[in-house]
Amino acid sequence: MPKDSLTITDNRTGQRYEVPIQDGTIRAMDLRQIKASADDLGLMSYDPAYMNTASCRSAVSYIDGDQGILRYRGYPIEQLAEQSTFLETAYLLLHGELPSASELDGWVYNITHHTILHENIKKFIDGFHHDAHPMGMFVSAVAALSTFYPAAKHIADETSRRDQIFRLIAKTPTLAAFAHRHSVGMPYAYPDNDLSYTGNFLNMMFKATEVKYQPNAVLARALDVLFILHADHEQNCSTSAMRSVGSSHADPYSAMAGAAAALYGPLHGGANEEVLRMLREIGSKENIPAYIQRVKNGEVRLMGFGHRIYKNYDPRARIIKRVADEVFDVTGRNPLLEIAGELERIALQDDYFISRKLYPNVDFYSGIIYQAMRFPVEMFPVLFAIGRTPGWLAQWQEMLLDKEQKIARPRQVYIGSPQRDYVSIEKRA
Ligand code: ACO
């Protein structure tokens, strides 16, 4: 009779142990009973970079990396990208179900009416050097918001949590646009409540002297789809940071600043920026084979390729390619697209990439679209952060409500010196 358990024989002692298997996992704490001697702490698992460790039970998003599947709360990403809006998807991620018409109205109203920033935030952003990276400004400004909303520290209070969720989803585009306008020396443009979430973001980014900014509907929708695609991605680096900082019961602004900082890195949300730099460096299609050779020699990585989880085509990359066509109908074709397409074609036929299951990820094409929409390269990770905000918050809230969660505190395998006595400086060799 098959049993959902694992029998372990400790060859050091000859002892046998039986540990239960649930949802394809064993509990690491069940290994603690396995001891080589009475004073042994017990067996631990060693897993640098969490390659094979589930840190939580989550109902927010689901990925099957081999099949190239991504679902939010059970809904396929393709259907949400096609039929939903970013704010509706944000509601879904945070509440677990799609909203009714009146729930959606209330949700959109509340987010629309929390977009304004305290005027002092402008002074805070003014303090940055003119060439400060917008992501650096964004990370700091999200952290600074915590000082404006001291009630945010009441993380066990559902009403407080809800208010901070409204504020964070509402204010991230305003912060992002203010960071951009500071970089380019333009006056800050205030939110326009007549516009959609992404229409208003385009307004705050690009409004110049016109009395009323009219966002292009195709571009606003394309941005909405891109935000949907970025909204959650289970336990990625930045989401783990959000949960980890939040597990100490820090307020959500501080936790989200930590998440955004994790996203900044070139191996995560900074990759879309790196893709653009790489495509510019390659410059023309003739230079692609030489560049691929450098990748294979281990000199450089093909940015926008590869993923810890997807060992198949990233489903988001497929949707993005379609969005790109719609955007380029409005903006004209980005010449870098040809290089990207050819790079993808050559890489996908090359044994180096095939054998390592390296496919384009979400960042391979997103940057080309953002650039065509006139977003500066430095804004790309910030755009990613706006899209990921509902996912971070949904995961943060799930963590807080999960009775099994405690402060995140991994163990280590100590490999340093054994105990030794302090040597005074004159006696050191
Ligand atoms: N270019 C060239 N080779 C690569 C790449 C790449 N982009 N990615 C992985 N490889 C190779 C590695 O050199 C390694 O080869 P080896 O077995 O001969 O040593 C093998 O593929 C496995 O790579 P790992 O680094 O072990 O894979 P890991 O899961 O740790 O890394 C990561 C995943 C960080 C995304 C990696 O693929 C990468 O650096 N990609 C480029 C950056 C990027 O696009 N990041 C965005 C990820 S998506 C996101 O965050 C939204």
Image (cartoon, grey):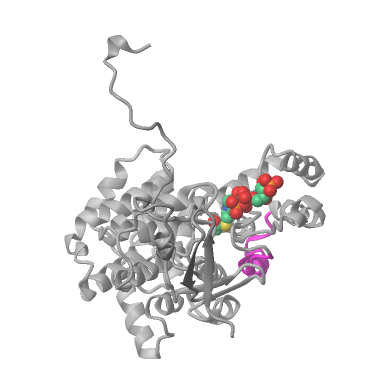
Which part of the image, by quadrant, shows the C terminus? top left
Residue 178 visible from this viewpoint: no
Viewer-nearest residue: 204 or 317: 317
| Residue 43 among magenta residues | no
Residue 324 in the magenta stretch? The answer is yes
* Residue 392 x/y as whole percent: 40, 65
Which one is in front, 428 or 342? 428
Residue most extreme to the front: 14
| Residue drawn at point x = 26 percent, y = 15 percent | 424
The reply, left or right, for residue 152 in relation to residue 323 is left
Specify start and end residues of the magenta stretch as a single range.
Answer: 312-334
Question: Magenta: predominant secondary structure element?
Answer: helix
Q: Point out residue 331 in the picture as x, y percentages from the top left corner.
A: 63, 61
- Locate residue 329: give its quadrant: bottom right
327 lies above or below 98: above
Q: Position of residue 52 (x, y in %)?
A: 53, 60
On the question of residue 98 being in view, the answer is yes
Q: Quadrant of the N terminus?
A: bottom right
Q: Is residue 401 above or below residue 14?
A: below
